Amino acid sequence: MTVMETTSTTSATSTAGTGGCAGPPRQPRRPDGQDRYTISEVVVLTGLTAHTLRWYERIGLMPHIDRSHTGQRRYRNRDLDWLDLVGKLRLTGMPVADMVRYAELVREGDHTYSERFELLKSTRQDVLSRIAELQDTLNVLDRKINFYADAGQALASERAS
């Protein structure tokens, strides 16, 4: 099984994150018919830095990246798909060590499906817990906002009288 087979088939306009510290910004559209990218092009397409891309490769988070005859990295669409998945995993809060472990399991082959399943299932549960916490926090904020909106209207009415 290849790394690409573990990712969903994403469209050329898929996103790798929502910007800021949580993940890379929205990806620009990939050039039609292109399947070879320099590290500079991948930087533009993903919003990641060249340093981050090289680090991902060094720690084993990226699959083997092809090289040109001059030693320049040549990324393929499957690598961009993998980076999209990594961006999503980052947004879940998955520790880098777990992402590296997932990448290792993918490279080891089909016999690791159950381990990958458990790792992703655990991450999903963590995300659901965080969503519940954020929903609770949102409810508190909404109550406070409503309080101040009502208090502001009452104060404005009082001053108008």
Image (cartoon, grey):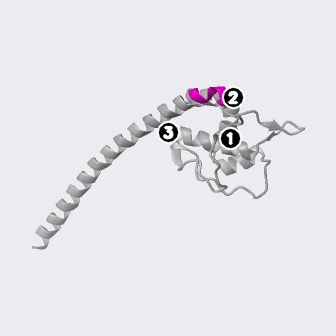
Which residue appears at 71% of the width and 55% of the height? Answer: 30
Residue 49 at x, y percent in the picture:
66, 42
Whether residues under marks 2 and 1 lie with C-beta atoms below 8 angstroms apart, the answer is no
Answer with mark 2 or mark 3, whichever residue precedes in sequence.
3
The one nearer the camera, 67 or 50, is 67
Residue 134 in view:
yes
Within 10 Å of the Cα at label 1, are there few (<14), some (14-19), or many (20+) other Cα atoms?
A: few
Between label 2 and label 3, give the one nearer the viewer.
2
Magenta segment, which residues?
Answer: 106-115
Residues at marks 2 and 3 touching, judged by CB atoms closer than 8 Å: no
| Disc marking residue 5 | 1
In primary-sequence order, the first of circles 3 and 1 is: 1
User: Residues under labels 2 and 3: Cα distance?
Assistant: 24 Å
Q: How far apart are marks 2 and 1 (CA)?
A: 11 Å
Residue farthest along the right direction in this orientation: 69
Residue at 72 percent across and 36 percent down: it is 2
Q: Please state, as top left, top right, bottom left or bottom right, where the N terminus lies in the image.
A: top right
Magenta stretch prevailing secondary structure: helix
- Judging depth in this view, the residue of 52 and 96 nearest the camera is 96
Label 3 secondary element: helix
Name the amino acid, label 1.
Glu
Q: Can you identify the residue that label 2 sits on?
A: 109
Confirm or deny contact between disc 3 and disc 1 (CB under 8 A).
Answer: no
Amino acid at pointer 2: Gly
**Quadrant in which residue 100 is drawn:** top right
Q: Which mark is residue 92?
A: 3
Q: How crowded is mark 3: few (under 14 residues within 10 Å), some or many (20 or more)?
A: some
Q: Which percent across, then down, holds residue 155?
A: 15, 64
Q: In this view, does 140 lie above or below 159?
A: above
> Is residue 118 placed above or below 14 in the rendered structure?
above
Q: What residue type is labelled 3?
A: Thr
